[in-house]
């Protein structure tokens, strides 16, 4: 990440502290969005798998209750 930041700075020839800060924030934002996306996907899949195992039991119980 640091090498990417230094490459951007050297490529544009600008050493402004504000420019360095903006580049750092852009990179961090992209990383944070990726982490949030992955965690969200993992959470939803784990909830799906957790609830899926009880699907058959709940459907069977509901059918038994409705047929009585």
Image (cartoon, grey):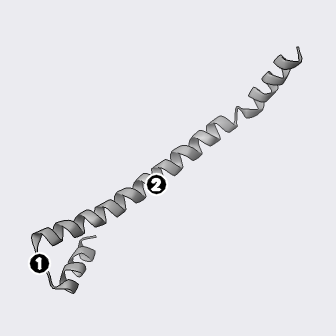
Report the disc number at residue 24. none
Give SS at disc 2: helix
Q: Residue at x 19, y 79 (%)?
A: 9
> Residue pushed farthest left?
16
Q: Quadrant of the C terminus?
A: top right
The residue at which mark 1 appears reads as 15
Where residue 46 appears, x then y in whole percent? Answer: 57, 43
- Above or below for 67 versus 41: above
In space, the residues marked 2 and 1 are separated at their CA atoms by 32 Å
Where residue 43 appears, x then y in whole percent? Answer: 52, 44
- Above or below for 44 versus 24: above
Quarter residue 44 falls in: top right
Q: Quadrant of the N terminus?
A: bottom left
Left-right relation of 43 to 27:
right
Where residue 3 appears, x then y in whole percent? Answer: 25, 76
Where residue 28 appears, x then y in whole percent? Answer: 29, 61
Q: Nearer the viewer, residue 26 or 1?
A: 26
The residue at which mark 2 appears reads as 37
Quarter residue 13 falls in: bottom left
Label 2 crowd (10 A; few <14 / some 14-19 / many >=20)? few
> Residue pushed farthest right?
67
- Above or below for 25 versus 44: below
Q: Residue at x 13, y 68 (%)?
A: 18
Give SS at disc 1: loop
Left-right relation of 29 to 48:
left
Label 1 crowd (10 A; few <14 / some 14-19 / many >=20)? few
């Amino acid at each position: 990440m640091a090498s990417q930041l230094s490459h951007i700075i050297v490529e544009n020839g600008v050493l402004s502290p504000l420019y360095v800060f903006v580049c750092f924030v852009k990179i961090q934002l992209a990383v944070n969005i990726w982490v949030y996306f992955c965690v969200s996907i993992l959470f939803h899949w784990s909830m799906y798998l957790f609830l899926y195992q009880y699907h058959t039991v709940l459907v069977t119980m509901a059918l038994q209750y409705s047929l009585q």
